[in-house]
Image: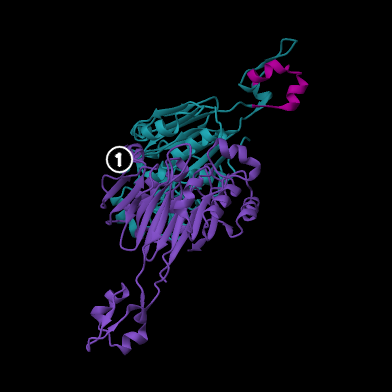
Chain colours: A purple, B cyan
Amino acid sequence: MEPFEVHILGCGSALPTTRHNASSQVVKIGNKLFMIDCGEGTQLQLRRGHVHFSFINHIFITHLHGDHCFGLIGLISTFGLLGRTAPLHIYAAPMLEKIMRPQLDFYCKDIKYPLFFHGIDAGKQEIIFEDNTVTVETIPLSHRMPCCGFLFKEKPKKRHLLGDAANYYNIPAYMRTAIKEGADFTTAEGKTIPNKLLTREPDPSRSYAYCSDTKPCPAICKQIEGTDLLYHEATFAESEKERARQTFHSTARDAAEIARRANVKRLIIGHYSSRYEDESVLLSEAREVFPNSCCTDEGIVFHV
Amino acid sequence: MEPFEVHILGCGSALPTTRHNASSQVVKIGNKLFMIDCGEGTQLQLRRGHVHFSFINHIFITHLHGDHCFGLIGLISTFGLLGRTAPLHIYAAPMLEKIMRPQLDFYCKDIKYPLFFHGIDAGKQEIIFEDNTVTVETIPLSHRMPCCGFLFKEKPKKRHLLGDAANYYNIPAYMRTAIKEGADFTTAEGKTIPNKLLTREPDPSRSYAYCSDTKPCPAICKQIEGTDLLYHEATFAESEKERARQTFHSTARDAAEIARRANVKRLIIGHYSSRYEDESVLLSEAREVFPNSCCTDEGIVFHV
């Protein structure tokens, strides 16, 4: 199967620590790289992680808190210095472009690539990106400012042509795509061979949901039902539940409850408050509710 | 003597590498911390270097290229999150505030501390900061945009009162400051004791010059004559001299020539181009001209 990977560049929260960078991830699907969030220092993390900068064409920003977007201007500038020519698309609250406009006018007037801002409505569940293999949907969340997560879904894939059958019936190359898409085959003698004798099931279409920052939102469970991998913020432990509620964040247990209710296959948590010297308390609280939970950390690559 | 230290937070240039961060330094004089430049990731470097964030009250920005100022908004925001109340002063080209204004309006409307921007004229040599012990002067440089270095000078210090003499003449406490400032002492019997019998020479007034980014500017030698420590950019080796000239940068040899002509005591070089896997070629080229040269690196503290 083609790769479907999540590279963790930063999984800390608002206050910087020596342990965690501000939020950013790169989702690799096939040979396409999608960035989610771009906190300060993200371009350095890309270097450290040996991620191919230039393959990133789409950046999705959940919300405008600084720890999710202060790295954008540096990354955009660096793309310019590196001589990028491919268009770059940024999906974010429309306010982002307004906030960045004087910087863009000052720093990016000579860049050689087109830069597009796509305003998104964080309150609406909708497909904001689509190509031949992938869709990206917004997941409305509830934070102190408009905020949405993103659901990456592979589109349904073609069936696998059975090599033995293809040889036996001598299926010509020009017919193969249609058969992979479900067509039957008619032999030179006029006999119809049903598709199910020629093909086997396609690879599953995988999905990844990124939900940060948010208080627990059970309303998202329907949308992310059965997702292969869920990243859910877990800023606090249960001992700080009150603080989590006040600041519209989640506890690790909250994240796990969402994972359980949404019946996802695996949960990864992050956006750790700087108060935790290590995240074992968060992980154990999550695992009590949803055993297949895991902590994110800078440099880890999760395979979906 | 009071500490006078230069903490290197970042000594890379425009393109990020895994070896060096974007430009930033903290100059510690006594218990005062001054920041010079604030490239992306500076607040993380402060954490890594265990520098006391909250003691930084003055930030000096040489010029507006992103690798010298993209870390400002993150640092300003973090000061807000940490509950800072002390005023913060930023000295930079007036354009900086204009570029940052929408960000400041969006992110800093709730900060509890006063934030002051002081516009500086990079083309003029002048004192832009002064308190009871230190002055900071601009050093006009020549780069692709207006740019100045900064010269930190301790003011002349008080003479040392000789303990034996103070006891012998029974000098009262209230007289001591005047004597340290050069006054003679008159005994109860009316005898005048000349100051030179009561005191010894004051500690030397130390100085530090920061010159980046710039093509070689011999005109600065007079201003920085005899400086204890000079940081001079050395973006390129001699093999890239042509490129250095085109981009208004210096080679390591250029930096050393300035150090030699200005008769400084010690040279430290930095702002390395990302093309150098290590900086030994730069260091050896500098040392050919000015033996007391040293490479900067993140985490190093130089004592002036």
- B145 or A246, nearer to the observer: A246
Residue at the spot of label 1: A106
Q: How far across and how far down the image is residue A202, in percent?
A: 39, 72
Can residue B272 be seen here? The reply is no
> On the picture, is A292 further left or further right than B172?
left
> On the picture, is B149 further left or further right than A171?
right
Q: How far across and how far down the image is residue B284, in percent?
A: 46, 58
Can residue B201 be seen here? The reply is yes
Which residue is rendered at x = 62% and y = 43% of the image?
A275
Which residue is rendered at x = 32% and y = 88% of the image?
A167
Q: Which residues are magenta?
A: B160-179
Tag 1, which chain? A
Q: Is residue B295 above or below residue A159?
A: above
- State the quadrant of the N terminus of chain A: bottom left
Which residue is rendered at x = 47% and y = 41% of the image?
A142
Please tell me whether residue B168 belongs to the stretch shown in magenta. yes
Q: Is residue A183 above or below residue B99?
A: below
Q: What is the quadrant of residue A93 in the picture?
A: top left
- B160 or B209, nearer to the observer: B209
Q: How far across and how far down the image is residue B233, in percent?
A: 41, 48
Q: Amino acid at mark 1?
A: Phe
